Amino acid sequence: MNLAEPQKNFSLKAYNTFGIDQVAENFISVNHIDKLRETLLKYATKDLFVLGGGSNLLLTQDVPGLTLHINLKGKEIIDTYDAENCVLVKAMAGEVWHEFVLWSLENGLGGLENLSLIPGSVGAAPIQNIGAYGVELKDSFVRCDAVEIETGILKTFDKAACEFDYRHSVFKTKFKNKYIITAVYFCLTKQNHLLKTDYGTIQTELTLQGVENPTPSAISKAVISIRQQKLPDPKMIGNSGSFFKNPVVEKTIFQSLKEKYPDMPFYEVGDLVKIPAGWLIEQAGFKGKRFGDAGVHTKQALVLVNYGNAKGRDILALSDKIQQTVFKIFGIQLLPEVNIYP
Ligand code: FAD
Ligand code: NAP
C-alpha cells in the first residue's frame, strides 16, 4: 500500500472551526485503517497530533511533528437483533457526526436526534462524550475500536472501559494521546424510541412547528432549528461551541450563591448543583463584548468567537480574563471544555 508523503508547512486554518491560522509541520490525511497503522509505524509517533473536524480545538501555536487527520469513512447497520428493539450500527471515525445522525434518522432509527447539528467527526464524539438537550453519546454507545499509537495494535473499548462522564472520557485522562479511535458502534432503537423533549426549548419549538406526536426526526428538526437561531455557524464566525464546561458545585456553595443572586439558574445533578457557565459569564459583563477580533457571542456568552483574524492566544487571553473575573465575583473556577493546543 502506498503511503502518502506528508504535506509540509500545511495551514490548518480550514481544519479548525475557530479559523485560527496555524501551521502543521507535517500533515497527512488518512482514509484507510491500514494506512493509518502503517503511517504510525513509519513516522515517529511522539510528536503526533490527532485531528478530526477541529471543532473542539484552540490552536495557540504551530504544530510540530505530524498532524494526522482522521478521514476513515463508512457507516452500516451491523445487526438488527430482530427480537430486541436495538439495531447495532457502526460508523467510521472520519464520518461527519451530523451526517451520521441524519443517516440514522433516514433509516428510521432513534437515539441520536437530540445530538443533531453538533459539528465534528464520529471518532471525536466519545472523547468528550458529546452531549446536548439532555442526551449524551454514552446513552447509545456500545463500543469503539481504537488503534494504540505506540504499537499500531487495534483494540476495543466497551462502555465501562471508556469511563464516560459529563463531557469526559478515559481518552481525556489515562489514555490521552495514547489511542486513535477508528470506529464507533451504537445501539439505536427501531421503535419505542426514548424521546427526550423536556430539555431547553425543544417542547416549545415542537409546538411552534405544530408537532403533537413527536418522532425522532421531528425532534431532530426542532433541535436544528433552535441551534440555528442561537449558535454561531462556524462557516460565518469562527468558534468552537461552548468554551467552558458548566460548573457543578456542592449544595452549600450553591445555597450561599443563591442567597446573593436569587435569579441564578441552576439544575440539580444528584447531590450537586449545575450552574450554567453562560449565565455567570453574562453576569460578569462579557456577553457580546469584543476585544479586537476575539469576542464573546452576542446570543450565548459561553461561546467565544473569532471575528476574523484573532490569534489563538487572543482567544486564550480573553478566556483567562473571563475565568479571573468570574472567579472574583462568584468564587467559581470555570474550566475549559475546548482542547487548547499545546
Ligand atoms: P477535534 O476538534 O478535531 O478534536 C477534539 C479532540 O479529540 C482533540 O484532542 C483531538 O486530538 C481528539 N481526536 C479527534 N479525533 C480523534 C480520534 N479519531 N481518535 C482520538 N482522538 C481524536 N460539543 C458537545 O458535546 N455538544 C454540543 O452541543 C456541541 N455543540 C457545538 C456547536 C458548535 C457550533 C461547535 C463549533 C462545537 C460544538 N461542540 C459540541 C464541540 C464539538 O463539536 C465536539 O466536541 C466534537 O465531538 C468535536 O469533534 P471534532 O472531530 O471536531 O474533534
Ligand atoms: P440553554 O438551553 O440556554 O441552557 C443553558 C444551560 O443550562 C445548558 O448548558 C444546559 O446544561 C443547562 N440546562 C438547560 N435545561 C436543562 C435541564 N432541563 N436540565 C439540566 N440542565 C439544563 O443551552 P444552550 O447553550 O442553548 O445549549 C443547548 C444544549 O446544547 C445544551 O445541552 C448544551 O450543552 C448543548 N450545546 C453544547 C455546546 C458545546 O460546545 N458543548 C455548544 C452548544 C450547545 P448542559 O450544557 O449540561 O446540557
Image (cartoon, helix red, strand yellow):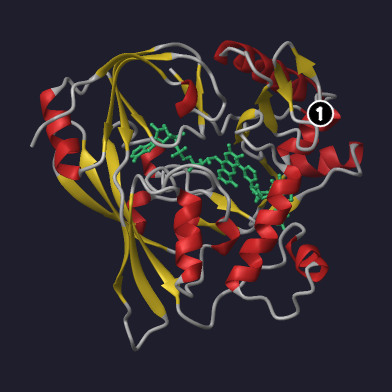
Residue at figure coordinates x 48%, y 75% from the top left: 108
For this view, does 105 lie left or right of residue 38? right
For this orientation, the residue located farthest to the left is 1
Report how many numbered discs are placed on residues in the image. Answer: 1
Q: Which quadrant, please, contains the N terminus? A: top left
Vertical arrangement, residue 257 with respect to residue 213, above or below: above
Query: Residue 258 location, x and y as percent?
Result: 86, 42
Query: Residue 71 location, x and y as percent?
Result: 32, 40
Q: Secondary structure at mark 1?
A: loop
Residue at figure coordinates x 21%, y 33% from the top left: 149
Tag 1 residue: 287
Nearer-the-camera pick, 179 or 209: 209
Tell me if I can see residue 28 in this picture.
yes
For this view, does 215 lie left or right of residue 109? right
Query: Residue 28 location, x and y as percent?
Result: 27, 26
Nearer-the-camera pick, 323 or 136: 136
Q: Which quadrant, please, contains the C terminus? A: top left
Crowding at label 1, few (<14), some or many (≥20) Cα neighbours within 10 Å?
many
Tell me if I can see residue 269 in this picture.
no
Query: Residue 207 location, x and y as percent?
Result: 81, 70
Please, what is the three-letter code of the amino acid marked with disc 1? Lys
* Quadrant of the image occupied by residue 197: bottom right
Residue at figure coordinates x 73%, y 62% from the top left: 202
Residue at figure coordinates x 71%, y 61% from the top left: 199
